[in-house]
Image (tube, rainbow, N blue to C red):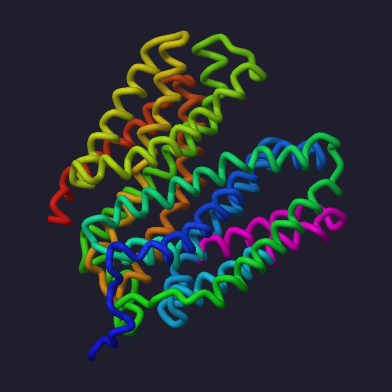
Amino acid sequence: MSVPSSALPLPVQSRAPLAIVTLLFFMWGLLTALNDVLIPHLKALYTLSYLQAMLVQFCFFGAYFLVSLPAGRLIQRLGYQRGAVFGLVVAAAGCLLFLPAVSAGYALFLTAFFVLAAGITVLQVAANPYVAALGDPRTASSRLTLTQAFNSLGTAVAPALGVLILPAGGSGNVQGPYLALALALLALAGFFALARLPRIADEAVPATTSAVQVARTHPHLLWGVVAIFLYVGAEVSIGSLLINFMQEAAGLSAAAAAPYLSLYWGGAMVGRFVGVGLMRLMAPGRLLAVHAALAVALIAVGVTTYGAIAMWALLAVGLCNSIMFPTIFSMAVHRLGAQTAQGSGLLCMAIVGGALLPLVQGHAADVIGLQASFGVPALCYAGIAAYGWFNARLFD
């Protein structure tokens, strides 16, 4: 089947479409990071246990697992641009559900989180492969790293927005910010619907195989799914227990430790901007292996020492996380062609690692102690290093 000239891959210098799609990365980073602000708010509002409060993350990350594969099929039908518009509308609907949830109760809040995450999942399935295909395949990792840096910028802005929700402690405070977010998402959907974004080659070729068959015939995709699962699980596990770690290992109070947590997440943003340049000097797979191996070394320092050294060693893991998601993703979808959307769906489904692996480390902390439990994310990073090393020649 011939591919129309309008569907040919874009040249590297096509920056306007990349700038437009980058807006999506910023927005879903903002929406995802707001969860960390709302969890303590809802816990206090509804007098929840910690387990009940963490249902927010289960509903949110559970959407990735349940929605990613259907989203891949949807993107295959609609194309990347219209798929992104659809995802924005669904995410806006999730934000609007926060308004009646204030009076309806916690169950509707959880439903709102699931719907919001479902929309974000569609955005991820559409936007990540679009960026990867938007130019030379050899520079796909650097493009994804750049856009992911703006995703991290969204996570940095989220706490400031959260201040609008928390101080007064009333549920009505939630309505204003989420109404504003819903309107912003709908406006962005309209902007995307009208934007003249070019199509990429694989949109012109219908898929003929299932996502599972795609993974079976492309081992680098299958192992990329495993690597994404490990990466998200490790990143979220460390972030979830860092304050407790700093209390135990460095003797800080919870109030004193909390501000340092922003350095862990902010390190990923800084590292992504730096990583764009590094990827032009080193093959993406080898750079991924180096970052993951360094993360293992830093965790080893953190679990075998105490005080400031242990604290800063674990905080520095945030810098190592910086290039991991975009590099794994671009390597995993490399040369999938018409099956890219299905591969993207599988990879986004693997984000469920952020819901499951923190439970594993939490159980380990109960059994063998908090510091020793960080061996769980260390093992995850070791697996990621192996993936990067053994797939380093993908772009050769």
Q: Position of residue 259 (x, y in %)?
A: 60, 24
118 left or right, relative to 144:
right
Number of marks in the image? 0
91 left or right, relative to 66:
right
Above-or-below relation of 258 to 62: above
User: For the N terminus, which image quadrant?
Assistant: bottom left
Q: Position of residue 105 (x, y in %)?
A: 82, 53
Residue 111 colored magenta? yes
The structure residue drawn at horizontal position 54% and vertical position 14%, both measured from the top left corner, is 248
User: For the C terminus, which image quadrant?
Assistant: bottom left
The structure residue drawn at horizontal position 13% and vertical position 52%, both measured from the top left corner, is 393
The part of the image, by quadrant, that contains residue 222 is: bottom left
Residue 245 colored magenta? no
Q: Position of residue 217 (x, y in %)?
A: 21, 68
Q: Position of residue 146 (x, y in %)?
A: 39, 49
Give, as a single range, the part of the protein colored magenta.
93-122
Above-or-below relation of 74 to 106: below
The structure residue drawn at horizontal position 47% and vertical position 19%, both measured from the top left corner, is 369
